[in-house]
């Protein structure tokens, strides 16, 4: 309380169990929940990934231009003063099928393991380290050697997603080159 008095900050409290009185809850979190619902519906991601999706949406919003800030600055730019690097944001979209490298796999098996992109690993590795949901949707790993599983120019025909019938490749025509 003394800090608030020293800085002339008025204490305000909402009534218990009345979140509609809090503007942050009413505006920010309501918007986040609505966007999460839309993303979960459109991507088919499991409901258990809602918190990872919240982190993903917030990470993207923090580096995107905002019309409410001076000169359309991103929230990160407005708070820190630097222009944020967005190259990691442009690599993958939420719940995109990917392959990540597992160097412990023995010879004759593919070292590329299927998984799903579920966010950015801010506290592990470099800027291009990502959170990967394993194919069985039970664990989240942080990996930096990651690529799209849907790249037609670099398909891995030995690895398939268990729940994706469309991943079964068609035969290669040896006389047709990309």
Image: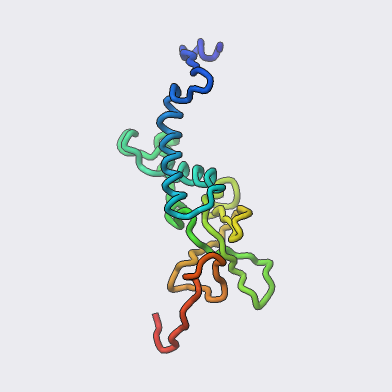
Q: Position of residue 93 (x, y in %)?
A: 45, 55
Q: Is residue 102 above or below residue 123?
A: below
**Which residue is depicted at the point 46% across and 13% down?**
10
**Which residue is depicted at the point 47% across and 83% down?**
171
- How many marks on residues? 0
In the depicted view, which residue is nearer to us: 97 or 59? Answer: 97
Q: How is the image coloured?
A: rainbow
Q: Position of residue 36 (x, y in %)?
A: 45, 44
**Which residue is depicted at the point 41% across and 37% down?**
31
In the depicted view, which residue is nearer to us: 147 or 150? Answer: 150
Position of the C terminus by quadrant: bottom left
Left or right for 30, reference 47: left
Position of the N terminus by quadrant: top right
In the depicted view, which residue is nearer to us: 168 or 127? Answer: 168
Q: Is residue 56 above or below residue 161?
A: above
Q: Position of residue 64 (x, y in %)?
A: 38, 44
Q: Position of residue 114 (x, y in %)?
A: 57, 64
Most distant residue in the bottom direction? 175
Q: Is residue 141 above or below residue 33?
A: below
Q: Is residue 15 above or below residue 80?
A: above
């Amino acid at each position: 309380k003394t800090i608030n008095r020293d800085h002339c900050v008025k204490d305000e409290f909402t009534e218990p169990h009345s979140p509609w009185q809090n503007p942050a809850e009413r505006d920010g979190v309501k918007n986040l929940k609505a966007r999460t619902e839309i993303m979960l519906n459109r991507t088919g991601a499991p409901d258990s990934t809602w918190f990872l999706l919240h982190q993903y949406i917030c990470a993207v919003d923090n580096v995107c231009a905002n019309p409410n800030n001076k000169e359309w600055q991103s929230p990160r730019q407005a708070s820190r003063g630097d222009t944020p690097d967005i190259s990691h944001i442009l690599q993958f979209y939420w719940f995109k099928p990917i392959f990540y490298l597992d160097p412990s796999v023995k010879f004759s098996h593919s070292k590329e393991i299927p998984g799903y992109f579920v966010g950015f690993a801010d506290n592990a590795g470099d800027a291009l380290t990502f959170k990967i949901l394993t194919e069985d949707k039970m664990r989240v790993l942080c990996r930096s050697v990651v690529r799209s599983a849907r790249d037609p120019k670099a398909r891995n025909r030995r690895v398939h997603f268990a729940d994706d019938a469309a991943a079964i490749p068609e035969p290669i025509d040896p006389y047709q080159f990309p």
